[in-house]
Amino acid sequence: MKMRIVLFILALGLAVGPVFADQPNYKGHAISMYGDMKYGPNFKHFDYVNPDAPKGGKVKMRAIGTYDCLNQFILKGVSAYALDLIYDSLMDNSLDEAFTEYGLLAESVELPADRSWAIFTLRSDAQWHDGKPITPEDVVFTFETIQSKGHPGWRNYYTDVKLVEKVGDHRVKFTFGGADNRELPLIVGQMSILPKHYWEGKDFEETTLEPPLGSGPYKIESLDAGRAIVYRRVENYWGKDVPVNVGRHNPDVIQYDYYKDSTVADEALKGGEFDFTLQNTSKLWATSYNEHPAYKSGKLIKDLVHHENGTGMQGFWFNTRRAKFADPKVRQALAYAFDFEWTNTNLFYGQYSRSTSYYSNTELASTGLPEGKELEILDAYRGRVPEQVFTETYTPPSTDGSGNLRQNLRIAKQILAETGWVVKDGKLTHEQTGEGMSIEFLTSSPAFERIVGPYIQNLERLGVEANIRLVDTAQYQNRIQEYDYDTITSLRGQSLSPGNEQRNFWTSESADEPGTRNYAGIKDPVVDELVDKLINASDRETLVATTRALDRVLLWGHYVVPHWHIRSHRLVYWDKFGKPDISPKYMRQPFQFFPDTWWVDTEKEAALKKN
């Protein structure tokens, strides 16, 4: 830690050393995964904010696709962007620690040493936008409603929460069941709380375009269904002076305009139709702005912001629920037809690194061969996992980038032949069933057509009949929820402290339940056991080792054709903003939310309008 930061913390009266929260009958202002906290009980604000940031102004953002629902907690419908802006949670996490939460709706939290329960004491001044107080009854209602009527993913996420009950005028208790699960108090601390009095008498499971009641820093001011949504800062927001909020939520208005695709949106940005975006299309980042007069004059800014977020795994995900993808060797063979090196050079301008882990850009990623505690964990599964888990470092198929894949395609044909797939009359056919291999790549993004196209050409050289199916956002979401696809392109992001959400990603229980994020349909008892071990890890060392073991087993399952990642956010924005001197290590994804520590600089904005 730099000296000037230490002095800054001391000046605020914060605790520089670790604060431990795993003592018997702990009661305090914060909770963390393993007890270490950066900010003490008297902290005034996070280090990475400007506590004097001016309020005011308007920010226009872009969204892609459409929406038809303002309730993001249910399976039905396509939710509007940034609905979390209208809700508060019990706790809020800091962005310069791996996994620590500080009080928001809750002024304190109590935990026993075994973390078998947690009691949150609500702030007496916390209130809904209609002025009514937020109560323990609201918390109980939220949990029971989301569990019984919400998106199926929530049931997996909160599966070890056994009871939620009011235990005082401002106190609510969560009781946990099963094995030791240190993450659960933090998991429930993240829960957005809903108003019981608002939802009573309404059908929670049906889509709605009625702006719901919230308690957060913004409320929905207006909307043009499917085309735009406008959020306005709540002037008398109850929580504006809570330490986790100081210096944040600065613009008066945040507006999202919806566009058909990123190319159309990019032209709108250059025309000044909106103010800020994260550019996730490498071609547009490399070529779209350099000759624009506003970019040359410094009015339109390209900003490459490095971060330490986990980059997860993006790839072509095979739906193993379909018999043709059930054999991991088939999936392995099909990966040989994807030429990342050529794609990166010719389509991405060399901007990306190949992904070799589901937990890339973190210490959780498996590397080399397993050793130490990780090897000890994996040894218990010898004979139940591929032998390569112990003997080979996972590396996706690679090329020299010339576009010549002959050697890779020979290997693919050999592997396919071992599984009964051979070329007959130019078509890859299963010897026993007579079924031909066909693959439909489902997408809602036209930008991915140029990436999938070369892969399809290579697959056709193997005798595969492949095509791209481009659908609208609503149809895409419905098909994903029902697992009605061969292959999709998706990013499975990861936190620095994986836990209960892993059930929703990988386990047998989630494979057939509609709406989970187990896109590949993984049903592997070893994976199920490793997920349980990960969730119940008693310390950071065990968590890291178990996650690496899980990562390795998933990689050798060949569930995806790995794509790529970048360790920076590519921001493009008009020069009208101010921002703090310190950037957080772990940035919230700015493509969905405007960075909430930035503000509209009135002088810069006036200069833009003048010129």
Image: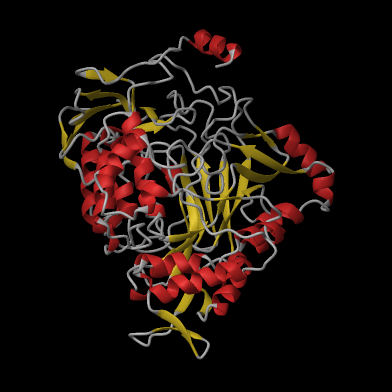
- Rendered residue at 56%/38% (across/down): 595
| Residue 358 seen | yes
Q: Which residue is painted at 64% across and 56% down in the image?
A: 281
- Residue at image coords 49%, 41%: 310
Q: Is residue 69 left or right of residue 246?
A: left
Quadrant position of the C terminus in the picture:
top right
Left/right of residue 324 with respect to residue 44 in the rendered view: left
Residue 228: which quarter of the image?
Answer: bottom right
| Residue 171 visible (yes or no) | no
The mark total stands at: 0
Say which quadrant the N terminus sits in: top right
Residue, far bottom: 425
Q: Is residue 441 above or below residue 605?
A: below
Q: Position of residue 284 (x, y in %)?
A: 70, 56
In the rendering, at what x and y percent does residue 344 appear? Answer: 65, 57
* Closer-to-camera residue (597/278): 278
The residue nearer to you, when weighing 342 against 108, is: 342
Q: Is residue 3 above or below residue 602?
A: above
Quadrant of the rendered image containing residue 86: top left
As drawn, 229 above or below 196: below
Q: Where residue 259 sits: x, y (%)?
A: 60, 62
